[in-house]
Every structure is written in structure tokens, then in C-alpha cells.
Image (cartoon, coloured by chain):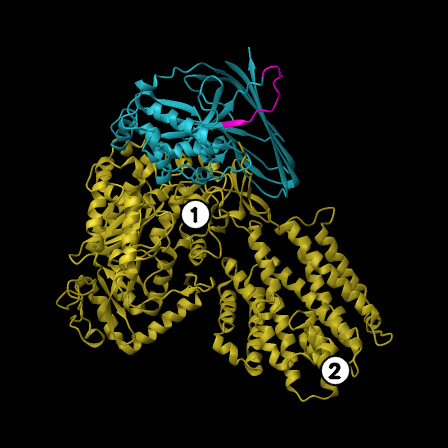
Chain colours: A cyan, B yellow
Amino acid sequence: MKYRIVHSTAYQYSDPVPVCHNQLRLTPRETPYTHCKSHRLLIRPVPANVSRRKDWFGNIVQSFSLDESHRKLLLTATSRVTVSPQVIPEFSQTPKWEDVADGIRSQTLDGWFDATEFVFDSSLAFSDASFRDYAVDCFGTGHPILSGAVALMSKIHREFKYDPRATTVVTRPNEALVEKHGVCQDFAHVAISCLRSLGLPARYVSGYLRTIPPEGTPRLVGADASHAWYSVWCGKAGWIDLDPTNDKVCGTGHIPIAWGRDYSDVAPIRGVFTGGGQHTLNVSVDVEPIE
Amino acid sequence: MTEIVEPATPRGLISGYRPIPGVYDEMFREGGECREHGQKMLAELTRLGAGELDRRFRQAEKLVRDDGVTFNTFDESGESSRPWNLDIVPAMLSRDDFHRLDQALVQRATLLEKLLDDLFGPQKLLREKVIPAELILGHPGFQRAYHNLQPPNRRRLTIYAADLARSPDGRWWVTGDRVRAPSGLGFILENRIVTSRVLPGVFRAARPRRLAPFFVRLRETLRENAPRHRQNPRTVILSRGADSPTYFEDVYLARYLGYTLAEGGDLATRNGRIMLKTLGGLLPVEVIFRRVSDDDCDPVELNSASLTGVSGLVDVVRNDEVVVANALGSRLAETPALVPFLPAACRMLLGEDLRLPSAATWWCGQARALTYVLENLDKLVIRSAYKIKDTPSIEAALLTQAARNELVEKLKARPSEFVAQERIVRSTVPVWLGSTIEPWHSAFRFFVSADGDSFLTLPGGLARASPDRLSLDRSMAAGERAQDVWIESDGPEEPVSLLRSSDEPLVLKRSGNDLPSRDAENLFWLGRMIERADGAARGLRVLLRQVTDDANDESNVVRTALVRALAALGQIEPGFAVDGLKSGLPDLQESVPGFVFNTQDALSLKSTMDSVARLVNTVRDRLSIDAWLTLNQLQTDWTLSPGQRRKLDSTALLQLLQRVVTAVAQFGGLSSEGMTRTQVWRFLELGRRIERVWHTATILQSTLVEVADPEPFVLEAVLESCDSIMTYRGRYLSTLQAEAVIDLLATDDTNPRSLIFQLNRIQDHVSRLPSAGQAVLGPDERLAMSLHNAVRLAEPRELAQADDSRRQALDRLMQRLLDQIPKLSNAISQRYLIHAGLPRQFDRESI
């Protein structure tokens, strides 16, 4: 699949902002299945310099500062991405989940080092008895790890209510677990916390989702949103992305931007400014399939 | 070299000294005879005798108090600073002892630097399982932003401190590694200065090694590390500000090393560089010697809630446009859980054995260690494994059964968050206790500085002593006494001073435009507050003298006028100035101390004095030492215990008011004689002049607009409140007339107390500020000029003219001043002083 993705963010301030510093994670990631053909970032007012680097997780970070006074900040990221289908292993062919957990703990399984940091607690996804209890019936003794992870995804999809008003970007997963509601971000944090509680490495992925309009209605431009899901490490089978919001193993409709331990590692825009008074924020995302 | 040394047989002040059995004593052997390296020092101390020693001890106490050495340990009300208690007996170490320590400390610093290089780089230590991956990758302080942040070839550790204890067999043990922004260097310098000043003979006889060469090397290292102008890079000490526990030391080091003291708000990122905001504009900074914790240095990439850092700093470091010492992220090396893995890391990174052992430590994140810890809990101290904050350690043996069970549960539930440490039986040092010397337990802190490619140990240190062995384990601030650490020298030492260490020719400078805007602001307000205190004290003094007089018609008239003036100045309850309300209020005389000490009221004299104390602290490095001492002493006089406060009568209060007037006069003299005419002085002056206009205009308006009957006594009180009575009498003898008084206080440009005199000075100052003197006048210049002209053109006779017992012209002129003066003050702030607001975060974009 080929996509043209336009992600626009507009900040409006009631008072002038003399200075701001920003870091953006808006460039789709290169993976064996995704290729970002072009990426263009438009910033108004125009900063003197935009620097680009890779962070610890390999995500592309663009940073810029503005030191001329402004009342409006406009960011438009336009990306062209090709996504090829990922070969998903037979669930039964993936290792036993206990073997993955043991191999990580004992630092013996091939590839342990790169996976191991995703088993430890982070500020928005951490192990706890309540997550273990919630996940334990998905991971029967000797089950293949991917069967367990998919069962957990379906359980969250089944039992949690999608409710954009119930949570914020800093809601902790233990609260979401008690209330059984939230948005894609909360579902991903709950799933990651469950997997870590079982000693399994899991990471947070931010990205875009192709939305398919109901039959007979045209695709609405700009009505999409950025999305999030999680990825579980299956030993020699590698990382497999799962989307609990849609109860789906991720395919060509999912376009990853960045991954990390949880949302706070991959927030699309992080910034500090002075002044500004009241501010409003408008975000629009448009994922347009081309060809 | 042979020298006859008195035999060190115990006698005199040390006759009662008994080293504690089974404990190492730094000065005496078990049998009681003095160790060789301490003999000269002991002989000199003994020669002084107990009486003299105690006198010197008090002298030292006073020196420390005068220098304002405090280690702020906030009490519950959050305001007290505890003075630094310095013992008069130095802790002396032998040449050989220090030599071994030096080598071991240099090795340890090298190890920690290489360890950080690896953990923030290739992470071989983790991949090869020398250090468990969880310990670093699961470390809440392992910010990913630090990884590969440091450009190659930059020193990561510029300064390292080790906390040490000596066990009964004489071996040294490390109880803690400090790399964040270790405090103590300022105290070490101060301890040395005071100790050598009160014990000059002992100092000469024992001849300890000098400290200055170390600081010269430290400064050189910082300079050599600068990314661009290595000749003379602008270096700042980044401080957490006047409320931080180490502020005294931040100021002290800034002064000693010759760096600018800056807070986060004084620095800004512009065009990829770090700039210091000064009166003359933004100046590039090359080196930041930080006293701020790693994670608080940049809200953009690190702790977003922090206000002490500089937005964008991490990116500037990444691009190698500024050097931060110690490097951001170095704190990781302080992690207590790393301790058990240091010997193996040392073998891998340096190929040698670790010379200096740490106190035995177990990281509970390892199953075997946890089992051992649970079995031996009572012998161990439990601490946080990662030490994000200075959390107190837990002594399992001292816990109640319930608390102990709770601890065991916590250890089992989240083992990786804890370490257990064996306690070292600490050595003792002799401490002066008023008439004898006794052994107290000791903790030592030593400092190591980067030096070229290697490290250099400070031949001195900080010893803390306490009779309670356990209290020393708690924190840097714990311990009842501090001691200067003396290292036996190898021979005579070259004197070195930091003031003339460079062979480079100096460029002569006169300007002072690089004054940080925040300092200018604080100086401006210090000027205002000092003058406000002076005005209030003078007014209250006149009032107190009046109310103690017998009541008669004349004194009633004067009292009414004074009460009105003081109410207008905000010094007493306004109700006293309103006829109808007066009867319902308590007696004026008894109420005055209450007003003066009402800290709820921002204008009360005590509140003003508190502001002075706070401001003086923030601009301490900008004032002359004598000017600072004067205000510091005044603050001490004005700090009353609740008991003193209750007993405060008008006589005692009058004395306190007198102290204010005298101290302000002294301060004024010292600042006019002792300060160069730089912007520092100008802002202080501007503050004082502006406040004085406000004060005098308020008094003239509230006392002379309504013509009192009879008026002469009121005129006299006004002259006295405005410090012009002697001038007046010199001119007109005892004939008191309104016109002459108004002329003297308003329009006479020879009287340094008159309005026109202040306005003259103000106009002059604003015209010499950095952005002044352009074709179009700034708003501050325009306001100053218009106020000056208004008073200059006023006719004293017209001002004194009354219709229906009311002086309309005087009222109008004074009202104009009172309206415009705050505007002038704001205009100056806007132009030179105002800061951008606090940094804010974007609401994180919702997904």
C-alpha cells in the first residue's frame, strides 16, 4: 500500500509567545515493511534552523526553536509511505511464552539485549499484580507467546469501552484497568503493562491508521487521527505489532512513526514556551491511499 | 630535617583523651601516644592551653557567623539556615596515608568516568553481563537523552567527591560516590581560612598542604574544555538559587573562581548557543559549572516540570556549543546499586583491581543477594537502589516489629529498588569541647578534579564529626562539627593565589554591562527596600518619641500629622489616622511593636527587613564584603526570639529603629565610597532615589497639605522624619516656617534629602544606563525628565500658599509624583529588568 499522509497541528495563543523550543516525532519509521519515500515539514513562522537526529530508540526527531514573537504556530508534516505486508508467523510456531520470559531474565536468549529494556517498568507502563491477574488466563502453561498476546488483545478489545473523554495523555494504566475504558493509548499501555508483568518485553508504537469509510460514503479529508498500538517480542519470531483498539494483528493499514517504552518516549510534539496566555490546539490527520 | 618536638605525653588538655577501644583514632594510637604526623600540631595546641584554645574557638565561631556560612537545612517553617559549626581542631592525615588515598581516589574517578563513557556509549558492561542490564535500562534515572550526548574528547567528570570512613584496621572505605554537583568545596575553603586565621602558630608549625593549586587546576580544566574560546571562555556557575541548600557555596565558589553566578532564568538558548542575559544584551556562555541536578537542566528533553534549567540546553550540548560540568547524566555513577559491580567493572575497563573498596553492598535485584539481605537484615542499612532523591536510609535493627515486617514485604515485592549496606565502624577524631578534647566519630569527604588527561586529589578535605556514630550515615548536612582536613606536607610549598594565576595579559575593562539582568533587578529592589526601611525607621522613631511625651494640644496635633504620614507609608494601621475609629483601637504606643513586626503586612518594617535579607543574599557576590557585613549584622539584630518579641517595649524598639538608621547610613557610605560606578552601583542607587522620592512626597502630602494649627511642631517633626532638621536649624535657627521647610525638602538642590536632589540623580542615572542616550528618549528617560522639570519649576512660595487651610499646589505636585514614580519604576523594569515568564509545556497532543 502507498499512502500520502498529512498531519497538521495549529497552536493559537491569546498573548504573544516570545520564545519556544520544540521536538517533533512526526517522521514515519523505516522498518523491513515500511519505507518513507519522502517527508516534508512545514513550520510557520519559519525557524532559523531545524535539526534532525535519531533518538535512543532509532526514531527520527526534528527540533527547532523560535525566538521571534508569534501568536500562531503551524506545523504540517507530509509523508509518502509504502507499506508491504508483514509475514506473520503461525501462532503455534512462536516460542512458549515461559521460554521467552526465562530467556530474557537469564540474559541467554538470542537478541535478549535489544529486547530487554522493554520488560522493565517505565512511567506509563509497569508491572503489577493486578495486570498479571488480568492477563494470566490468556497465557496458559506452555502456550505459544503470540497466541497469548493475541488473546490478551482480544480480551482488552472485548472488555474495554472506547471513550475519548474518560482519560488524558497522562492517565496511568492501572486507573484504566480499573475503569475499563479509555482510548488507543490506554489500551496499549494496559496491554504492555500486562506483558511486562509476565516478564515479556513489549513496546509502545505510535503511528497512523488507514480508516475505511462505510460503504457508499466518501472518505473525509482530515478526519483521521494519529493512532497507537503495541508490539510484543516473540523471541526468534521478532516483534509483532498488535492493535487492541481494533482487535487486529497490524497489517498494511498501520503506518508506524515511532516506538518506545510508552507514550512519553514518542510524544509527537514536545515543547516549552513562555508567555502565550490561553492557547488552543487543532490537529488534523489525513491518511490518503494512493494507487 | 630534625626538629625538637615536645614529647607527646598526654598532659594538659589531652590528659583525659581516651581513644575508644576497637576504633581507629586519627590522632592517637591505642596506647594513647600521639601518631607521628600529628605531633607538631598537638604540641602547638597544648602550648596554647585550654583557656586560650577556647577563646580561639569562640573567635572562629564569630568569623564563621560573620561570613554567613550556612548550610541551609530548612526547618518545618522552611526558613531557617543553620550556621556551619566549625571545630577548632583540624583532622590531620599523614603524608603516606594521603599518598595511598590519592592514588586510590584517582583510580576510582578514572573508573567512574570510563564507566559512564561505556554506559552512555557502547554498553559493553551490560552486553557482557558485568553489570545486570536491569540495573541501567530499568534505572528511573537513565534518561535516554543522555545516551551518546557527550561529544567525544570532552571530560565527563570534572569534579568528583568520595565519602569515606576508616575502619578499625586503618583501612579506608567508600560510603558514597558524588558526581552530581558535590557540595563541600566552598566549606573546605572557608574552614581553611578560618582555621588558619585563628590558629596561625599551629598552622605554621604543622604546615599542611595548600589548597589553592587544586582550584587553579580545576579552573584550567574547565577552561581547556571550552568548545571555542579556550583563552578566556565565559563560564557560569548554574545555581538553583537563593533557596537552595548550597547557595552559600555557589556564591562562594563563583567569587573564588571568578565566574558569573547564574540561575536558569538568566540563561537562554539562541541560535544554537547558550546566552547569558545581561544589561548589555545576550552574551555567549561556553562552560556551565552546574550545581543543578542532571534531570533538572532542560525542561524540553529532561524533567519537564523543572524550572531551574535552560530550555534547549541538551540540544546545545549535543552540538558541542557548550560544555556542562559534570556532563549531563553523570549522576548515574552515584547509583548505590552499582557498587557491588565496581570491582568487576574496574578489571574490565582498567585492567586492574579496585584499590579502594566500598562498604559492602548488596543489590536486592539479584535473587542471591536478596536472600542474604533478608537473613542478615539487622546488621544492614537499607537504602534506595537508584537514589533519585536523598531518601533516608533505614536501619532494620531499630524498627518496630510491624515496621520491620513492612520493610520485608517491600523488599520482596520490589527487590530491585533496594540495596543493603554494611555499616563501617568509623574512626574517631579529637574534637574540642570547651575545656577538653574528646574522640568523636568521623566522616570524610575528599575531592578529585579532572586535570589534563588524568585526575588530581585535593590535599585537604571536609571532616564531619559527631558523638553519635549513626547520625553521620544519614546525610551531608548531618554531624555536629566540621573540621578542616590537614595533609602533612612533603616540604615547603610555593604560595599560589587564584588571583594571579594567568600569564596572559589582561584587557583593562571599565564597563560592567555584562551584569545579569536578574542581579540588576535584585540590586534595584535592594536599594528600594533599604531606603524604605530607613524611611520607616525614621518616621516611627519620631512617632515613638512623641507618644511617650505628655499629651497636650500641641503634641496631639503633631501626633495626628505623624500618624497620618505613617499610615500613608503603610507603617501603622490606617484606622489610627481616622478620628472616628481611633477610640475603638488599642493604645497607639502599645500597638506600634505589633505593626512593626507584622510579617503578614508586606509594608511593615519587619517585612521590609526580611526582603532586604533575602535580596542581600541573592546579590551577595555584587556587594563589598563590608557592606554585606553591615546588613547581615542588622538582620541578626532584628531576628528576635518569640520571648524577646513579647517583651519588646518602646525603649527597646527605639534602639532597634536606631540600628536601622545607623546601618543604612553605614551601608550608604560603604556603597558610595567602596563601589565602582558600574551598572551594579547605578541600579542600587536608582532604587534608593526612587524610594526616597516616594517617601518624602508621601510625608509632605500627608502632613503639610492640611495646615495644622499650630503648625511649627508639625514642621519640626517633618524635618526630623526627613533627616533635615540640622540643616534647617543651621540656616534658619529656630524659626519654623512652612515655605522654608517646603523649599528645603522639595526644591533645594543642595539638600541631599530634597525631592529635586533625588530627581537630579535619577535623571542622571537613567541617562547612563546601557540603552540610553539615543536620539529618541526611552520612556524611563522621558518620565524622569518630566518629574524633574515639574519640581524644578515649582515655586516654594506657591507651594506653601494655603486656601482654606489647604495647600492645593503642594497637593497637586505631590500627587503627581506619587502617581508617576511607580510608572518610572516600571519603565526601568520594562526596559532593563523584566524577564520572560516561566517556561510552560505544550498540552501534550491527544491521540
Give the residues drawn in magenta, as a range.
Answer: A215-227
Residue B498 pos. (x, y %): 40, 54
Horizontally, residue A60 falls left or right of residue B708, namely left
Give residue B557's quadrant in the image: bottom right
- Quarter in which the N terminus of chain B is drawn: bottom left
Does residue B93 belong to the magenta stretch? no
Residue B618 pos. (x, y %): 51, 58
Q: Which residue is mark 2?
A: B557
The kind of secondary structure element at disc 2 is: helix
Residue B579 pos. (x, y %): 74, 78
Horizontally, residue B435 falls left or right of residue B169, namely right
Residue type, label 1: Arg
Give residue B248's quadrant in the image: bottom left
Residue at 56 percent of width and 47 percent of height: B838
Q: Residue furthest left?
A: B31
Distance (Cα) linking label 1 and label 2? 60 Å
Nearest the eye: B732 or B417: B417
**Given this view, does label 1 or label 2 mark the residue nearer the observer?**
2
Chain of the residue on which disc 1 is drawn: B
Nearest the eye: B365 or B802: B365
Residues at discs 1 and 2 in contact (Cβ within 8 Å): no
In the rendered image, the vertical position of residue B599 relative to residue B254, given as above or below: below
Does residue A222 belong to the magenta stretch? yes
Residue at 65 percent of width and 83 percent of height: B547
Q: Which residue is mark 1?
A: B290
Residue type, label 2: Val
Nearest the eye: B189 or A191: A191
In the rendered image, the vertical position of residue B755 relative to residue B379, given as above or below: below
Chain of the residue on which disc 2 is drawn: B
Q: Which callout, 1 or 2, points at the residue further toward the start of the chain?
A: 1
Number of numbered discs on residues: 2
